Amino acid sequence: MNHVLETACKIVRKADREHPADSVLRETFKRLRVFNPEETREISNAVFTYFRWRGFLTAEYDTRAQVEEALDFAAQFEGDPYSIADELLRAQTVPEWVAEEVEVSPEWLRTLQRPPNLWLRARRGQGNTLSQKLVNAEPRLLPDAVIYSGTEDLFRTPEFHTGEFELQDVSSQAVGIVCDPKPGETWWDACTGEGGKLLHLSELMENKGLIWASDRAEWRLKHLKRRAARAKAFNYRPVLWNGGAKLPTKTKFDGVLVDAPCSGVGTWQRNPHARWTTTIEDVKELGEIQKQLLAHAAVSIKPGGKLIYAVCTLTKSETTAVAEAFEKQFPEFKPLPVANPLKLDAPASPQIWIWPQDSGGNGMFVAAWRKAG
C-alpha cells in the first residue's frame, strides 16, 4: 500500500495545466510496468479522488496526508452524500468563476463528487446480448447502451477485439441518435477526434452512404483508422481540416455534426483535475472558436439539410451564446426541435441539455438546425 500511495503522490505533484493528471497516469503506467491491475486501479482512484476533493483539503498538510484526507472524504461521502452541506459543496467543489457560467445545483455538485460510470455502446440491437456476455454489465437508458461495473480489462476481451462494443459515454451516444443519419446520406463529422461519434453515425447509417471525417491532427485520424477497422466501419473518408474557412471538400451534405472542442466542464466528474486548470478565459476563447467552426461548416449544408452542434460542456458562453450568435448570422437555418433520447418524456426542443445527475454520464449540450429550402 505504501508504494501505491507514494506513486499517487508523485503523480499529484507532477500534474499541472501542461501535464493533465490522466496523461501523467498513462505515462507513469507505461514507463513503470511494475503494477498489477489492482494496484493500477488503486493509484488511479487515489489521484482522481485527490483532485475531486482538492477544494476541501487542509492546505498545511503534505501531499500524502492530503491524499489520505481526500480518501477519507470520499468514504464519508459514499456512506452519506448529504453529510456535506450544500453551502460547503458550492464553496469547495468547483472554482468561483463557474457560478458565472453554469447553473450550479447541489445535485450536479454531488454527482461531480462520485466516481463516474463506465459506458459501452454495443453493436446495433445487441445491448442485451452484450450484457449477458460480460460480467457486471447491464443495458441502460438507450437501446445499445450498456453500463459496466466490473474490473476486467475490457480491452483484452474477445468481444472488444471482434468489434462487439465501443467505449462511449451514454451522452455521446445520445448525440448520434439526435443526428439521426439515414442509410445512403452524406454526412460530415467536422471535428472527428478519435472517432467515437463517427463510428456511431456509421452504424446508424448501416455502413451505407458516406461520412467525411475531418480533424486537425493526423494522429487522431490514424487512430480512427484502427478503430474503424475493428468496428468494420468503412463508409467514411478521413481528411485533415484545421477549422478554417477553406473547407476540406466542395461536397454538400445532408447533415453536419460539429462536435466542437470545448472546456469539457461536462466531463469534470470523469476528469476532476480539469476543474482546477480550466479558466474563464479558456471558456471565452473556446466560445469564439466554436462560433467560427459553426460558421465555416454551415456553408457546406444542402437546402433542407441538418446542422448539429454538440459540446461536452455546460457553460453559457459555449452553449446558448454560441447558438444565439449562429442564428443571428445565419437566419436561413431554422431551429429544429429534436427529442432528448435520454429523457423521452420531455417535449422536443432545438436545444437539449444533458446533465450528469440525470444521465449518469457526461454533461452535454446539443443544438439542432435545418437549412431552409
Image (spheres, rainbow, N blue to C red):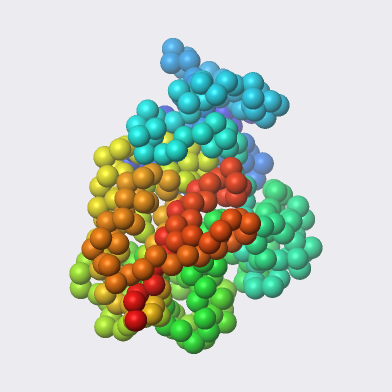
User: Which quadrant of the figure has residue 370?
Assistant: bottom left
Location of residue 279 in the rendering, given as x and y in whole percent from the top left corner: 32, 37
Q: Measuring 56% from the left and 76% from the top, which residue is drawn there?
A: 204
Q: Is residue 221 visible?
A: no
Q: Looking at this view, name the residue that lies furthest to the right.
A: 132
- Quarter of the figure with the N terminus: top right
Q: Position of residue 4 (x, y in %)?
A: 59, 32
Give the residue at the far top of this rendering: 60
> Residue at the location (37% across, 28% down)?
96
Choose top left, top right, bottom left or bottom right for residue 68.
top right
Q: On screen, 35 above or below 50?
A: below
* Residue 94 locus on image (x, y percent): 44, 31
Q: Is residue 323 left or right of residue 223?
A: left
Q: Is residue 176 above or below residue 85?
A: below
User: Is residue 59 or residue 43 the one in the foreground?
Assistant: 59
Across and down, in percent, residue 101 comes to 36, 39
Residue occupying image coordinates x 26% and y 83%: 250
Q: Is residue 138 left or right of residue 76?
A: right
In the image, is 294 to the left or to the right of 45? Answer: left
Residue 263's place in the image compared with 337, above or below, is above
